[in-house]
Image (cartoon, grey):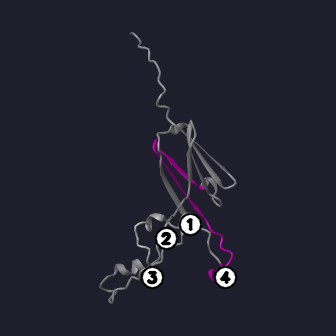
Amino acid sequence: MIKKPSLFKRLAGSVSMRSYEDEPEDDFEVDAPTDEKRDPSWQGAQEEVQEEGELPIDMYQTAESIVIRTLIAGVSPDDLDIAITRDMVTIKGAREEDREAPDENYYHRELYWGGFSRTILLPEEILIDEAEAKEKHGLLEIILPKVDKARSARLKVKTK
């Protein structure tokens, strides 16, 4: 039986929300083929697929910039990969788990461990070269200066 993750798990980024957006709310069962030798791909489908978590963000604007904030607690800033274009930002990283107890000794397991990523389409063009990222106490803040479309300059024609 495939179960839809809880709302908390989807919001916390421990599972990708895109995987479940179009599925019905009801749980359903998947029957295995009677002859696994006829369909060898079934064995691969039974193995657990490791998905990346989707990083939850806050994004807002000021008069001069677009600001993206996200929690990256447990991730070293050196282990983050932030790629920026004029209209898009992609943040990738991973939280490595230090297992101190075997699975059967856990009462609750709610923290997300493993890879995560998020691609954000920006509402306006930004100046890539002036962008900056800061991390403090597990909060990542990316400041993206907006392109000033009202700015103009006069160009002087030179003679040879």
User: Split into 4 quadrants, where in the image is the N terminus?
Assistant: bottom left
**Span highlighted in magenta in the image:** 79-107
Give the camera-side residue of 60 and 143: 60
Find residue 84 and name its label: none
The amino acid on which the numbered mark 2 sits, given as a three-letter code, is Gln
Query: Which residue is depicted at the point 44% across and 67% down?
Result: 19
Residue at the extreme left: 38
Give the camera-side residue of 138 and 57: 57
Marks 1 and 2 in Cβ contact (< 8 Å): yes
The amino acid on which the numbered mark 4 sits, given as a three-letter code, is Asn
The amino acid on which the numbered mark 3 sits, given as a three-letter code, is Met
Disc 2, SS: loop
Marks 4 and 3 in Cβ contact (< 8 Å): no
Query: Which residue is depicted at the point 49% across and 34% down?
Result: 147
Give the camera-side residue of 55 and 47: 55
User: Would you name the residue on which mark 1 appears?
Assistant: 114
Find residue 105 and name its label: 4
The quadrant holding residue 110 is: bottom right
Marks 3 and 1 in Cβ contact (< 8 Å): no
Magenta residue check for 72? no
Disc 4, SS: helix
Q: Is residue 99 above or below residue 79?
A: below
User: Would you name the residue on which mark 3 appears?
Assistant: 1
Please tell me whether mark 3 or mark 1 is closer to you in this view: 3
Q: Is residue 77 left or right of residue 160?
A: right
Give the alpha-carbon distance from disc 4 to disc 3, as whole Å.
25 Å
Query: Of marks 4 and 3, which one's residue comes earlier in the chain?
Result: 3
Find residue 50 and name its label: 2
Q: Position of residue 56 (x, y in %)?
A: 55, 58
Disc 3, SS: loop
